[in-house]
Amino acid sequence: MKASELKNLLYAIPNDPDIVTGDEWLPEQLVEARIEGDLLFFKFDNAPEESQGEEEGRGFVEHEVKMIRQRLAQLLEEPSNTETKTDALLALVLMAHELSSSEVIEILEQPTIPAYVSRGDSSS
């Protein structure tokens, strides 16, 4: 694809979506672009290859870490006491330990913090 074709496609987009590659269930966001000579290079926040670790030890990519940070800030800003916030953070840590990284992201992508995390109940 030539850059002119890409430009036309980008101009036709009615909103401002993130640029991603990969599978729908694991998109990798564009984090950098540069031109070298006649070539346009894109760098995406690639997850580690599955063969590099445990069964599902892919870890989190850059945009997922940003989202986790935002969700933690949201949890800390909630109008609740320290004990409730401590329980909720403990539930998040346990959830991150017990579930795969993709399951954790799926839960944290929900519009509101799940009640069992807000309550600090990691058994759900």
Image (cartoon, rainbow, N blue to C red):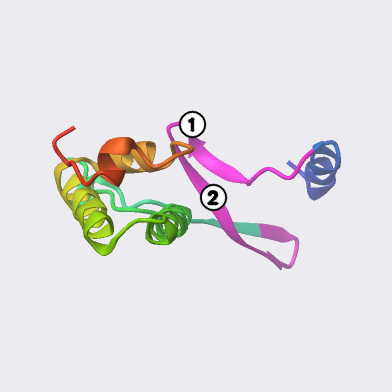
Q: Is residue 23 magenta?
A: yes
Q: Quadrant of the C terminus?
A: top left
Amino acid identity at mark 1: Glu
Give me the residue at 30% from left, 42% from top: 104
Using the numbered discs, state the Cα–Cα distance from disc 1 to disc 2 in whole angstroms: 12 Å
Horizontal and vertical percent position of residue 69: 42, 60
Helix, strand or loop at label 2? It is strand
Magenta residues (range)? 15-40
Helix, strand or loop at label 1? It is loop
Q: Nearer the viewer, residue 20 or 35?
A: 20
User: Label 1 belongs to which residue?
Assistant: 24
User: Label 2 belongs to which residue?
Assistant: 29
Asked if residue 51 lies left or right of residue 10, the reply is: left
Categorize mark 1 by other alpha carbons within 10 Å: few (<14), some (14-19), many (20+): few
Categorize mark 2 by other alpha carbons within 10 Å: few (<14), some (14-19), many (20+): some
Mark 1 and mark 2 in contact? Answer it, CB < 8 Å: no
Amino acid identity at mark 2: Gln
Give me the residue at 83% from left, 46% from top: 7
Horizontal and vertical percent position of residue 51: 21, 46
Q: Is residue 69 magenta?
A: no
